Image (spheres, rainbow, N blue to C red):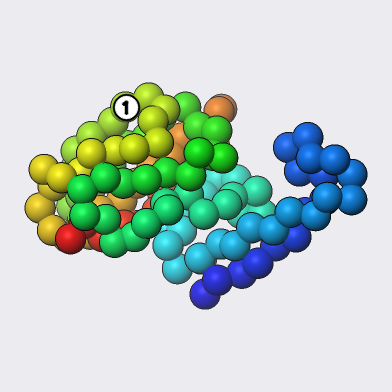
Amino acid sequence: MITKFAFDNVNGATPNNTQFIEIDSSLILSTTQNLNSVTNIILKNPVDKILLINKNINYNRFEIYNQEGKLLLKNNETYQIDVSHFNSGIYYLKIIISGSRDYTLKFIKR
């Protein structure tokens, strides 16, 4: 389910400058932060070689897990993650935002 949210004066935007974000709630598995502040984090899903993360997301690090919960990859902030060496299947991207806020999202590797 995709939900569209409207915000005024977001991240230093000028007053009366309404911005919109869309959230695909079927891709968000868990969060410790209010979903209203999330934009589309994964820009292309399914993924072939490079997992693209929205550059408007200000985060500290990421972790990628397989379906068994095994940590496969972790790194500091980057917006292009090479997953070409992963087998086809379902994986979980955990985005850690400043402090204890995090999001876990599902993505498919072709």
Q: Please tell me which residue lies in front, 11 or 26.
A: 11
Viewed as shown, does residue 92 lie left or right of 20?
left
Q: Quadrant of the C terminus?
A: bottom left
Q: Quadrant of residue 35?
A: bottom right
Q: Please tell me which residue lies in front, 39 or 31.
A: 39
Q: Please, is residue 1 above or below residue 11 in the view?
A: below
Q: Residues within 10 Å of mark 1 (few under 14, many from 20)?
A: few
Q: Please, is residue 3 above or below residue 81 in the view?
A: below
Q: Which residue is mark 1?
A: 75
Q: Quadrant of residue 101?
A: top right
Q: Residue at x 42, y 62 (%)?
A: 27
Q: Residue at x 21, y 48 (%)?
A: 49
Q: Is residue 12 visible?
A: yes
Residue type, numbered disc 1: Asn
Viewed as shown, does residue 94 lie left or right of 69?
right
Q: Residue at x 56, y 62 (%)?
A: 23
What x and y, as percent, mark residue 6?
75, 60
Viewed as shown, does residue 53 lie left or right of 36?
left
What x and y, as percent, mark residue 73?
23, 34
What x and y, as percent, mark residue 44?
37, 57
Q: Residue at x 34, y 37 (%)?
A: 80
What x and y, as percent, mark residue 40?
52, 54
